[in-house]
Amino acid sequence: MRKLLNATVGRCAALLMRLMRRANRRRTANLAGAFMRKIGPWLPEHRVGRDNLAAAFPEKSDREIETILSDAWDNLGRVAVEFLHLDRITILDMENPGAADVTYDPTAVERMRPIRQAGPRLIFGTHLGNWELPARFARYYGIESTVLFRPPNIRAIADAVIELRAGCMGTLVASGFDAPIRMARALERGETVGMLVDQYDTRGVEVTFFGRVCRASPLLAQLARHFDCPIHGVRVIRLADRNTFWADVTDPIEPARDAEGKIDVAGTTQVIANVIESWVREQPGQWLWQHRRWR
């Protein structure tokens, strides 16, 4: 019965996604954002988000926290809609500038140039703004890349998700026991490897994030230690109209190293957490506060 139910739900969800692709992205995203602002406070994740915000920003009032959390629900609703239109969201062409949904400044252009060159590189992102869009840059600019993702549990939905991503991203690697090996092989081929690194990892290393200890995946730092390759952070945040975006990429971050000069895994994971915290502090209403980052 469970298999039958999952198959039915999966087929319905896949059909719904295909139908929603026919709708206008901006109009649908506006509706989804407004809907999530209304329904979000009634969900159990709202309390998780409120507790997270109160601990991260003890100086903020209850009203300020609720405003940030409302924005976070709005952002989540928009990301869900935008995911169905990833291949249609336009990115500014640095060679032929013009109107585009995703823009960036000359500084980002200069930081992007080394990434377009051959050689292994690691890219990290976070659940901020639209966290699906950074992976589009690699495919758009012809960068050979491998992206780690977590597939949905229901097979039909997972297949639909892969189909949507496959046309506009690099090689997709589902999280699992063989994922580190596949990512290492991609680096050996001189590719760029990307992943989101802000979720709690029960087997991860301890880091301090917003003044509290949590666990983060050491995978990116472990790969960096093995290959000693550059590490960049990428974010795509939402602009004031909520339907267009601004992209940014960091210079290669300076990893922590041990006495022998090798990359220190725990220390580098903390360096990455510090970068992410600075991003979230700039745009708290665009981060996914509703997940249990601290446990």
Image: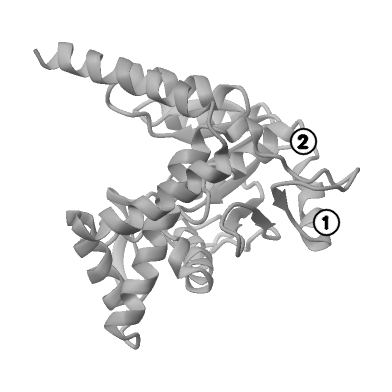
Where is mark 2, residue-wise? 141
Nearer to the camera, 98 or 211: 98
Q: Name the amino acid, label 2.
A: Tyr
Tell me residue 190's x, y (percent): 69, 31
In the picture, the disc for residue 91 is none
Tell me residue 99's x, y (percent): 80, 48
Q: Name the amino acid, label 1.
A: Glu
Q: Residue furthest right?
A: 96
Instruction: Tell me what residue is drawn at x 73 percent, y 43 percent.
Output: 91
Give the position of the C terminus as an image quadrant: bottom left
Nearer to the camera, 146 or 225: 146
Where is mark 1, residue-wise? 110
Tell me residue 191's x, y (percent): 67, 32
Q: Quadrant of residue 161?
A: top left
Secondary structure category for the residue under label 1: helix
**171 w.r.t. 28: above or below:** above
Which badge, 2 or 1, comes first in the chain's sequence?
1
Measured Cα–Cα span from mark 2 to mark 1: 14 Å
**76 w.r.t. 206: above or below:** above
Secondary structure category for the residue under label 2: loop
